[in-house]
Amino acid sequence: MITLIEQQMRSLKLIGMAQAWKELELNRQLSDLSINDGLTLLLQAELREKTSKRFDRLIKNANFRYQASMDEIICSAARNLDKSLIEELSTINYIAKGVPILICGASGSGKSFLASALGHQACYLGKKVAYYNTQKLIAKLRISRVDGTYFNFMEKTAKTDVLILDDFGLMPLQGQELIDMMEIIEDRHGLKSTIIASQIPFAKWYEVMGEATIADAILDRLIHTAYKIELKGENLRKKR
C-alpha cells in the first residue's frame, strides 16, 4: 500500500526518496531516525537514483560498440599499454583540456574496446559522449545535407564532450568528406576531446586523406597535443 508521503514523493518525481521511504517503513526504521539522519538518507537515495538514470541515459545516447569499463582494460608491456596512463585517463582530466586520444593497432588488438571503455568512464562521470564508426558518420553527414539537418548536427557534434571515431582510415577521405572532417576537428580543437581509433599506423594517417593541405590542418590539430596509444600483441578475439 502506497502511503500519502510516498505518493507525494512520486508525484514530485522523487523516485529514489520514495523507494527509500518505503523500505524504511517496511523495515520499521522510521521511528529510529532523527529528522536530520532521515532526511540525509532520503536525499542520498534520491541522488543515487538521479545519477544512475543520468548514466543510463548518457550510455544509451552514446551508442557504444561495446559495453566496457576501465577495470576490464588489460595493461601489460606486451600490449604496450601502461597502467599509469589508464589510471590518468580514468580521471577524465583530458576532457576539460580538450586533449585528443589517438589509438592505433592491428585488428583484434582492443582499440574499439579501449575507446568504448574511455567513453563509458566519461559517461559515468556525467559527460556527454557520441560514438561513431567513421564511415557511418560520413554517411550521416551526407544525408544531413540532403534533409537540411547538417548545421544542427554539426553544432550538436561540436558541443559533445567526447566524440569517438572508430575504424578511422579504413576508407580514404576525399572531397566534401575531408572538409566535413576538418570542420568537426576544428570546432572541437582545444575545447572538446576527440578519441580516434584506427588500424592504420599513425605515420600513415596522412595517406588516407586525399588533399594535402586539409590533411596537414587536421593532423596538426590532433597529433601534437594528443595521448597516442599504439596497441600491440596478439589478437584478443582469438583468446576469447
Image (spheres, rainbow, N blue to C red):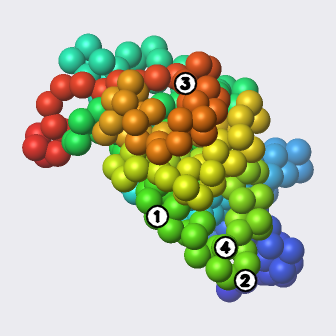
| For residue 106, side relative to residue 235 (left or right) | right
Q: Are marks 1 and 3 in contact (CB under 8 Å)?
A: no
Q: Nearer the viewer, residue 21 or 221?
A: 221
- The circle drawn on residue 2 is 2
Residue type at the position of mark 2: Ile
The image shows residue 227 at horizontal and vertical percentages of: 52, 22
Is there any visible trace of residue 128 in the rendered image?
no
**Residue at the (61%, 26%) spot, across then down:** 220
Identify the residue at horizontal 22%, vertical 42% (top origin). 108
State the CA–CA distance, disc 2 to disc 1: 48 Å
Which residue is labeled 1 in the image?
A: 136
Q: Secondary structure at mark 2?
A: loop
Which residue occupies the foreground of this view, 48 or 104? 104
Which is more N-terminal, label 4 or label 3?
4
Disc 4 packing (10 Å; few <14; some 14–19; many ≥20): few
Quarter placement of the N terminus? bottom right
Tag 4: amino acid: Arg
Task: Report x, y in % for residue 158.
Answer: 73, 50
Q: Residue at x 40, y 36 (%)?
A: 207
- Of tags 3 and 2, the one toward the viewer is 3
Q: Quadrant of residue 75?
A: top left
Mark positioned earlier in the residue sequence (3 or 2): 2
Image depth: mark 4 or mark 1 in front: 4
Label whose residue precedes the other's in the sequence (2 or 1) = 2
Rounded to the nearest whole Å, what is the CA distance between mark 4 and mark 2?
A: 52 Å
The residue tagged 4 is: 145
